[in-house]
Image (cartoon, helix red, strand yellow):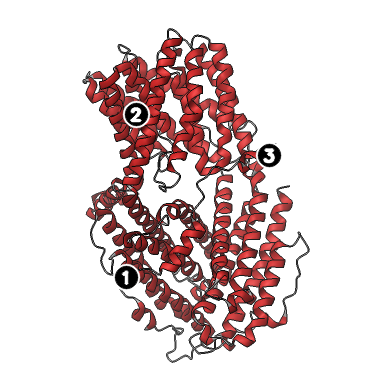
Amino acid sequence: MNITAAKRWLDPAHWQQRGRTALRVLLSHYVLNGAVCALGLFLISTLIQAMFGHAAAAAAVVGVIVTIPPDMAAPVRGKTSHMAMAPLIGLPLFLAVQLLRPHPVELGLLLVPATFLSFLGMAWGKRGAPVAIAVVFTTIFSMSTPAAVDMNEALLRTTYFALGSAMYVVYSVAANALCNARYRTQLIADLLFTVAALIRTQARRFAPQETDTEAEGVKVAEIAAPQESELGELLRRQAALADQLKNTRDVVLESPRTPRRQRLAGMLVTVLEMRDQLVASELDLDQVRTHAGHRSALNDVRQILLQIAAELEQMADAMLTGRTPPSATDHGTRLAALRLEAQADSAGQPDNGPSGLLRGVAYRLIHLNDAVKELAGLARGETMPDLTVVRNNWRLFVSPTDWSWRPFFSLWTWRAPALRHAIRAALAVGVGYTIATLLPWGSHEYWVLLTIVVVLRGSLAQTLERRDARVAGTILGSLLAVGLLAIHPPAFVLLLTVTVAQGVAHGFALRRYLITAVAASILGLVQSHLLFAGSSPTFAFLERVGDTLLGTAIAWVFCYVLPSWERGQLAGLVRRTMTAQARHARMAVGLASLHDIDTQPELAWRLARREAYDSLSALVLATERSLAEPRAVQPPVRLLEHLQAHGYQLLAQLSAAKSMLLLRRDQLRLDEIEAPLAEAASRIEHTLTAEPGSAAASLPPAIANASVPIEALPDPFENDISPWLLRRLSLALDLSGKMRSEADQVLEQIK
């Protein structure tokens, strides 16, 4: 192992890859966003210090720091209201803390309910979480300033805090608009990297499986585990893609008025279609992989997928660096020319069913190849997208920017995760504040509270991840800060350090929290040194590490108080997944899809498809988080994984059926498939949405084509592909029955 690691470190290709990865990070949207935030902090603090002095700048910097968390790459529309929310709520809290600083008991009585109310903002999801954190930061960072001697000083400091916040809101809105074009490009490039990683994972699925007729039982046991591992990794990649698509859609699909914006929006729409093609490529793959004669063809297809992934990465790299992306390689001829017959030991064996399945796999990959060529044409500016499709996606998929009261009214049930998290955080802050004020070195008790707030997450898995990263990052960052302060740099260098540390901490907060923890520790120690001149760096290091260890310990303990175990949310996620799959089936293969392909039902299908992917991804992520929880409260993970796998396969079957209806209508006997389509849509919807145990068990004869031997089906490239469509519908029905059974078992076990 050591020799292998040494060879890898000595390999020039290894360092080239690390260099490319580092460059991609430096050119990413989150690093740009962090740099923009740091520049705003530097400009505002410098300006206020020049106009009003050091004390005013210190208070204004606090205003800027607590306003920064919601500032991310976002649509231009609604940016002002999103950024202004935290300062408006936090301003009276800042003043109240300033007034109560000489009164520890009263201050503690303020911190607990303020934390509770602030964390209720988590009910608004990813949009509300940064605002909630920013409001809590307002109370905590207000404690970082020297105590006000009287009411006038408290009011004056609050005024400078408000001035810094207001200036940063204006700055962030202007900077977001100025960087909007760059953000769009970076988000699409980041999306292409994610798709490339997904395709590489998919390529591993095309590796042929070894078979051994003499010891078949042994071989099957050896193969089963890797198959589940591969599918699990594929589901996680799909979940990551679905999560990334949400923010990308909001920015890239907003107001696509210029040709450049339209091309980027077209690339996003193409990626959405590629996801369907990747899902559909899974069809019949397990049967194809076990056929010995397909080994050469599968290896060839695998290499094509790896080349496509590499081309997507090259395209994304070119977009990030401002170069014209290279043209995409056309693999269509190579795919069409593959010898997709079974490669038996004896030459000249006639074509059979498995060969037909492999032909279908290659055919679906031709569409993926065409999508990559379309992406390259759009990226190079050689083609323009279908503006009707772009406008429809803009209208359907961009998230609303107004604040609704609906999440607030849904909070008030005892099992609501946001309510429990708010209570848990408030109790943790109360205990942390009490302990911190009793410590002999309690000059920076807000460090304990800050650690609690950033470590304590809504789930145990997230809390444990934050805990480890916070401790390691604090030790490393504190050592770096002490080393810097030991050489007594000038004030300008310290101010620049604070600025850079703030940018890095913000930029990597959602990407790699370890880096954020390092930067935050540097920021905290250097800022403390600026506010409290003459303090010992060595003592500050020990205090910082001690407070971090204390804060992480408290956060860790309180994540078990009123816990929101994933099993409590899984029932709702399972029902959401089943409902979304049922609606997608109705929209994908219902009669409306047969008669009105190019009208409103097509848009409804796209919405249903998005919800099917999003709900399945949410279920995958919740199941993954549950693995970190105590065994006694873990849900039936194996059942959930089977449910997810069958949901993924159902999406694949329906995507293939929809593709036939969209792209190969002229090869279907429409009069013969109309009744089976209606029957399949109705039966799948009924099966998935039925009450536990009430789903029908028998399949309707009109679509019972899965029982037909594969060898009896026509060549998938012949004119009449109706039997293959009927096969897809029958297999989809079978999968819906399996999902219903597994969902019933999961719901029964997590009661």
The image shows residue 566, relative to residue 650, as above or below, that is: above
Q: Are marks 1 and 3 in contact (CB under 8 Å)?
A: no
What SS does tag 3 mark?
loop
Residue named by callout 2: 477
CA distance for labels 3 and 2: 38 Å
Q: Which mark is residue 383?
A: 1
Query: Residue 318's spot in the image, x, y percent?
Result: 26, 58
Q: Is residue 206 left or right of residue 657?
A: left
**As shown in the figure, which amino acid type bears the numbered disc 2?**
Gly
Looking at the image, which is closer to me, 405 or 670? 405
Please tell me whether mark 1 or mark 2 is closer to you in this view. 1
The image shows residue 723, relative to residue 209, as above or below, that is: below
CA distance for labels 1 and 2: 49 Å
Residue named by callout 3: 415
What SS does tag 1 mark?
loop
The image shows residue 128, relative to residue 364, as above or below, that is: above
Mark 3 or 2, nearer chain start? 3
Please tell me whether mark 3 or mark 2 is closer to you in this view. 3
Mark 1 or 2, nearer chain start? 1
**Residue at 46% in and 59% down:** 394
**Residue at 24% in and 62% down:** 324
Dot 3, crowdedness within 10 Å: few (<14), some or many (≥20)? some
